[in-house]
Image (tube, helix red, strand yellow):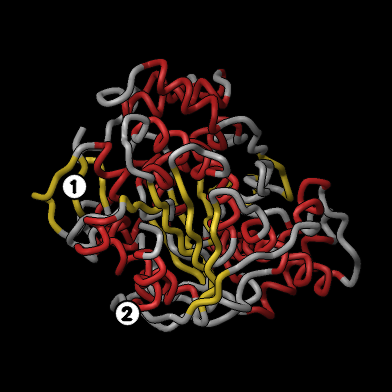
Amino acid sequence: MQYFSTNNPNHKVSLAEAVIKGLAPDNGLYMPERIPVLPEELVQTLPEMSFQEIGYAVISALFSEDLSESQIKELVDHTLTFDAPLVQVEDEVYSLELFHGPTLAFKDFGARFCSKLMSMLVEKSSKTLRVLVATSGDTGSAVANGFLGVDGVEVIILFPKGKVSPLQEKQFTTLGQNITALEVDGVFDDCQTLVKQAFLDRDLNEKLLLTSANSINIARWIPQCLYYFYAFSRLPKDGKKVVFAVPSGNFGNLGAGILAERMGLPIDQFVAATNVNKVVPDYLNGAAFQAQPSIPTVSNSMDVGNPSNFPRLISLFDGDENLFKEKVKGYFYNDGDTVQVIQLVQDKGYTLDPHGAVGYLGLKDFLAENSDYVGVFLETAHPGKFRDVVEEALGEKLVLPERLAAFLEGEKKVIPMEKTFGEFKGFLEGLV
């Protein structure tokens, strides 16, 4: 299997190059040259399969030309060490809980897969692999913990000063070892821009082996499709159509769901639910796609004004924007909506985090217009990761899971940095 750039379909590379490079030299994202479609019989037997068995089947379809059966099994077993339960919140509304991993966020799936695959691919390299990561919250903690202590790999995390929840911050600024945190005086989009500039700087790339573990990297992005297959297999459908509502920032998670659908999973609709950083809902509702400066919100992991994975979404629909807009409906919500629905759903006996709250709102609005569906919203992080927002909304204290509370005990260690590429490049050159 080869992987092409979304900016140039004629530029194709191997799996190893796509994973290690992360971003194509023309600034495009890598995509598999063909998307395998699973046999219908296999899709029908998903309910009888374990999460791991589903993982073997899906990852084999995508990677069997490049990885051995034993490598695929090792990858899946390393990734799927925790469950992603489907929890009924009310009639026809289910939460897919993706926060049962080490850092209590959905990105644990992709980060664990990515770290294991990268370590397989660089085993014979004499160069240290430097993983550059821009984060608005959960990516940093998931990648840092996924790569912690991995031989031959150093992780450099860029995060916007004062715009990441204190608990999220602690999860990647207190680890030490092969993890370095850079506190950038700017917003998430500035961090993301610095990372992209580093990948496109020829001089830097001659001196250092650089890669990314953001969702722009296929090794982080692709494995997220697994929990869509798993959730679908466990969902009581009763003859109804299926819709997945995805709280969205950089749009890798939604893209992974669409990948699952392209592989033959019969998902009828998707909902792209955002906060007021709404460039994609605006696009889906008829406006031109226009990147905007990001706006801070209580659902900070979605504060993205220029979603990196947007070209991937277009590619998944073979450039057919009409098909894209038919399959995906866009909704957005402000902080008041988000806080209010956290309160409302608590009364139903379920605690939402601010991102799951946005997904729930999108799902409810879709179901209000489409009664023949059963819906799943993605609960992407444990509410305790956004304790300040959730406690203020509910007027009560949250009990943190033990492993989340443990992060608070660590000492924060960061390197402050301006948002200029010159300063960032100088830091990287100092690593040589």
In the depicted view, which residue is nearer to us: 374 or 181? 181
Q: Which residue in the structure is indicated by mark 1?
A: 4
x and y, in percent, of residue 25 in the image = 19, 58
Q: Is residue 393 left or right of residue 145?
A: right
Does residue 406 lie above or below 419 as drawn? above
| Numbered mark located on residue 237 in the image | none
- The residue located at (54%, 33%) in the rendering is 79
Residue 120 percent across, percent down from the top left: 39, 30
Residue 275 in sight: no
Taking the image as shown, residue 77 lies to the left or right of residue 391, namely: left
Residue that badge 2 annotates:
290
Q: State which tag comes first along the sequence, 1 or 2.
A: 1
Counting from the top left corner in percent of width and height, residue 105 is at 63, 51
Q: Position of residue 10 (x, y in %)?
A: 8, 49
Say which of 221 and 370 sits in front: 221
How packed mark 1 is, by other alpha carbons closer than 10 Å (few <14, some 14-19, many 20 or more), is many
